Amino acid sequence: MISINEVLETNRMVDSQHLDVRTITMGISLLDCIGETAEVTARRVYDKVVDKAGRLVEVGEEIAHETGIPIVNKRVSVTPVSIITAHTGGAVLIAKALDRAAKDIGVDFIGGYTALVQKGMTSYEEDFIRSIPEALACTDRVCSSVNVGSTKAGINMDAVALMGKIVKETAYATRDNGSIGCAKLVVFANAVEDNPFMAGAFHGVGEKDVVINVGVSGPGVVKAALERVRGDLTEVAETVKKVAYKITRVGQYVAQEASRRLNANFGIVDLSLAPTPTMGDSVAHILEEMGLESVGACGTTACLALLNDAVKKGGIMATSHVGGLSGAFIPVSEDVGMIDAAKSGALRIEKLEAMTAICSVGLDMIAVPGDTKEEVISALIADEAAIGVVNNKTTAVRVIPVYGKSVGDEVSFGGLLGTAPVMPLSTVSPARFIQRGGRIPAPVWANKN
């Protein structure tokens, strides 16, 4: 039974601390849409997305109105398109069908323009990956991801080398709009099949036909709770655990209601603390409330470790199914505290990379100079994949070489994507390393069978 005090507390969190459900994401299998031609497949893909997710936005708004809890985004994820187009090709045609469906049903983004090549690439998968720049340039709401490594398979360095080129081509193809295509492209290691957050969401082949996954949020709620803590770090951790429990209970309720009303399966609740550029909704400010002068200072990684662990411990008690990424996001352009720290020089790429060993994702929404060489981007991807593969966690790179911009410039992506200062990268060449290709073997401890 929910008490009146819990209702009042939730209302306070919504009104003054930016509590929200960040996304309801419907995952849809497209395996039954495969036809003899790309045109037939595209038509079936459009029809199924519209049929299954046609009421997603309406239901999300109904639940938000009834509960008073904002549901910021309604999204769709689909089976990796590289699988759907393996026989017929025509991936860009499918991307356009997905984009049209997303617009017609009113969702923010549709994810799943995806390839899983952690161990090797087939010829059709390579062709698919090479289509990504065009697909992201000719659509507005389609998001793309490529998984280049896993703890079991190691790192596919041929795919890593190719993705440096693809990121650069995507930046150029969308150069008239701040190279925004790269904000819709994620390179993963250990990608998960039930992630509700964009740009990396896709519907795994092990999932049911239609599934609802919910991503919660609430950095402002955690920050407000810590402002009242005067004790040591054990008390800080206990406070975060209790708040995470309350936030996750909200997500559990929304997920169950949305699943029931949409006749879909309840998948998971993702416990990630997802920031926005809004003041008072920053993960960086939580770390600073723990005692740092600025995020990026020595001690930042330790504070992030405490936060992530406490969020998981509190969240797992609040929902029957935890999944997705679950932890704390550190996207530079989407967090006002991260933006300020990057502008001041307190936060640099090297520190962000260390933090990615702890956080939910990786090097996320980072703008770099437009003339950054493709092999440098590939090497950045390789470094991040290595952190994920060795530590058996999901890591990712969403880096944006902004065409025509240099260190010190800024680029605005609008909305939740925020504003990014262009950050410096090492220009010492890793070209010979990247050109070797091949595969970095899986760590020895991955052989557990």
Image (spheres, helix red, strand yellow):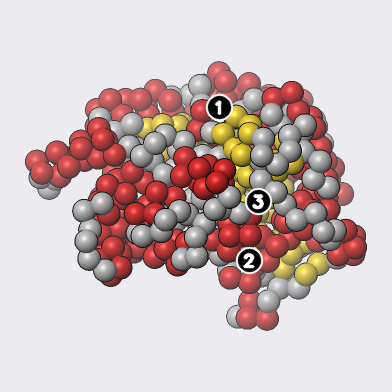
Q: Residue at horizontal 61%, vertical 39%?
A: 421
Q: Are marks 2 and 1 in contact (CB under 8 Å)?
A: no
Q: Pointer 1: residues within 10 angstroms few (<14), some, or many (20+)? A: few
- Looking at the image, is mark 2 or mark 1 earlier in the sequence? 2
- Image coordinates for residue 104, horizontal then vertical, percent: 55, 18
Q: CA distance from mark 1 to mark 3?
A: 20 Å
Rendered view: 298 above or below 285: below
Q: Are marks 1 and 3 in contact (CB under 8 Å)?
A: no
Q: CA distance from mark 2 to mark 1?
A: 30 Å
- Is any part of residue 217 visible from this angle? no
Rendered view: 304 above or below 269: below
- Image coordinates for residue 383, horizontal then vertical, percent: 70, 62
* 202 sits to left or right of 43: left
Q: Pointer 2: residues within 10 angstroms few (<14), some, or many (20+)? A: many
- Amino acid type indicated by mark 1: Gly
List the single residue furthest toward the left: 4
Q: Nearer the viewer, mark 1 or mark 3?
A: 1
Rendered view: 300 above or below 254: below
* 213 sits to left or right of 339: left
- Image coordinates for residue 239, horizontal then vertical, percent: 25, 59
Dividing the picture into quadrants, the one containing residue 157 is bottom right
Of helix, strand and loop, which one carries label 2? helix
For the residue pair 344 and 157, the one nearer the viewer reads as 344
Dividing the picture into quadrants, the one containing residue 174 is top right
Task: In the rendered structure, find residue 387 and report the number of the disc placed on it.
Answer: 2
Q: Quickly name the residue at label 3.
A: 397
- Image coordinates for residue 340, horizontal then vertical, percent: 50, 43
Q: Residue at horizontal 50%, vertical 33%?
A: 416
- Amino acid type indicated by mark 2: Ile
Q: Quickly name the residue at label 1.
A: 414
